[in-house]
Amino acid sequence: MIMPNIPTFSLEELKDGSRQKELAECVTQIGLFYVSDYGCRDSLHRNVTDMAIDFFEKSRQEEQAAVSLEQGSNRRGFSGLGTESTASSTGVGHYSDYAFCYSMGTSNNLFPSDEFETVWSGYFDKLYSASRDIAKSVLISVEESLNGIDDIDEFLTCEPLLRVRYFPEVPKQRSAENMPSRMAPHYDLSVITLIQQFSCPNGFVSLQAKIGDKTIALPEKPGTVVILCGAVASLVTRGRIHAPIHHVAAPPTDRIEGSDRSSAVMFLRPNANFRFSVPDAKKCGLDVSIESETATFADWMGGNYVEMLSVEETV
């Protein structure tokens, strides 16, 4: 395991283009970086994640059911421990994600209380604004490679998804010696993904990415967020932007105690009707199993694109 010097950019540096060449090199070679001064304090992240964890740990079964969708692939409201499987959805295994999750988007949301809705909605708006600014800078840095985007601002006025996850301490059978991931290796179906994480109390670094033939650790850096370029960014730049494979590692047996972890993740996803060339996606090395020549993002996401459904249709 190595911890390389991943670059950190301030949001202002990204917007004014003062480090654009360095950004272009970063997104095309490793596809990840940190961003500081992006308009959201660590204390707000903590407030939002603590609110979610409090619900995970203290809510009754009927309260959880009231904010859960019957179709488990839909991303709204509460998802219980072990109810999702990144391994299954990516075809690398059948083990579950060892995490609780709460999700929201721009519409059709489910909240357990008015206070929860108020705090989360304000937080969502801040992360949406920051992620759009960051994604715009990423795309502009390789603008000559853009394919199928006439207006970057319009493209990024889209359907983001916020997910707060809590990874409790794993049981021994889910330790690294027995099952190395709490969440399986994958790339994100997003333009970019913004991650605010809180480190494991015992110092174990759980968020890890594969760069070339090496696995790197992505520790929490106070005052910053991790940015991962997603598969959609790779697609719309003809494969020039790198979408890194990453996972949430399980701790070894001797580091289970104090290995719980939480994160707030904003996926900046295109609109459901965003259409792309399936052959072009495959040329970029993306796993698109659709047989037609073109597809929409909703087709690619399948049941995960809850914006295509109304709450009344799914509960």
Image (cartoon, grey):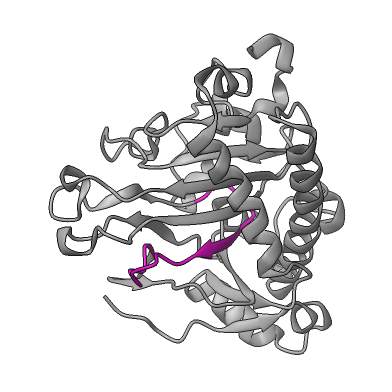
| Residue 244 position within the rendered picture, expressed as x and y whole percent measured from the top left | 45, 62
Q: Image quarter for residue 247?
A: bottom left
Residue at (19% x, 55% y) in the render: 176
| Quadrant, the N terminus | bottom left
Q: Image quarter for residue 71?
A: top right
**Residue 111 vertical position relative to residue 15 in the rendered view, above or below:** above
Magenta portion: prevailing SS class: loop
Q: Is residue 184 left or right of residue 19?
A: left
Q: Please say whether residue 296 is visible from this viewpoint.
A: no
Q: Is residue 244 left or right of residue 44?
A: left
| Residue 139 position within the rendered picture, expressed as x and y whole percent measured from the top left | 71, 66
Of the pair 19 and 104, the residue shown nearer to us: 104
Q: Which residues are magenta?
A: 188-207
**Residue 106 vertical position relative to residue 10 in the rendered view, above or below:** above
Q: Is residue 215 magenta?
A: no
Residue at (40% x, 64% y) in the render: 200
| Residue 273 position within the rendered picture, expressed as x and y whole percent measured from the top left | 74, 32
Q: Image quarter for residue 213?
A: bottom left
Q: Is residue 196 magenta?
A: yes
**Residue 3 vertical position relative to residue 205 in the rendered view, above or below:** below
Of the pair 223 and 270, the residue shown nearer to us: 223
